Image (spheres, grey):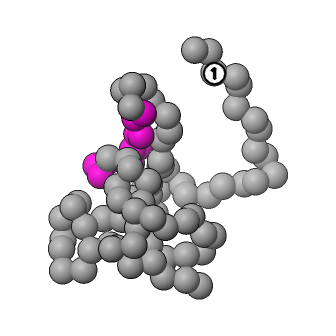
Amino acid sequence: MSRIAFSDLANADLVVDAVYEGLKGTSNVGGEPLHPLLGVGNMGGFRKKLGASGRLVGVVLTSTRSEPDWQDDLDPFSWKDPPELSH
């Protein structure tokens, strides 16, 4: 398993099972890894990524794995392709 330091996140590739480290010594959202890694916001479970035009270009779903009403399971065998998005 590879570990990517906070200082390397802006240029890091996404790797299955890698650990993307937060900024050591901070306990606030400024030290979490998703913003420098993916350019998304740093608050909430659904974090949006906006393009240069201000349009939504992606969403990241985060989890604490501690919400019984929102189980953190993905069944790849029941996956369905999303419907086409209209522009």
- Residue type for callout 1: Leu
Q: Quadrant of residue 83?
A: top right
Farthest residue, direction top: 87
Tell me: residue 86, above or below residue 48: above
Q: On the rendered structure, is 1 left or right of 23?
A: right
Q: Quadrant of residue 14?
A: bottom right
Q: Quadrant of residue 75?
A: bottom right
User: What residue do we see at 60% from left, 69% from top?
Assistant: 15
The residue tagged 1 is: 85
Residue 64 in percent (x, y) is at 40, 62
**Residue nearest the viewer, comparing 77 with 48:** 48
Q: Is residue 49 magenta?
A: yes
Label 1 residue SS: loop
Which residues fall within the magenta stretch? 42-51
Farthest residue, direction bottom: 1
Residue 27 in percent (x, y) is at 18, 71
Q: Is residue 17 magenta?
A: no
Tell me: residue 45, above or below residue 25: above
Q: On the rendered structure, is 78 left or right of 12?
A: right
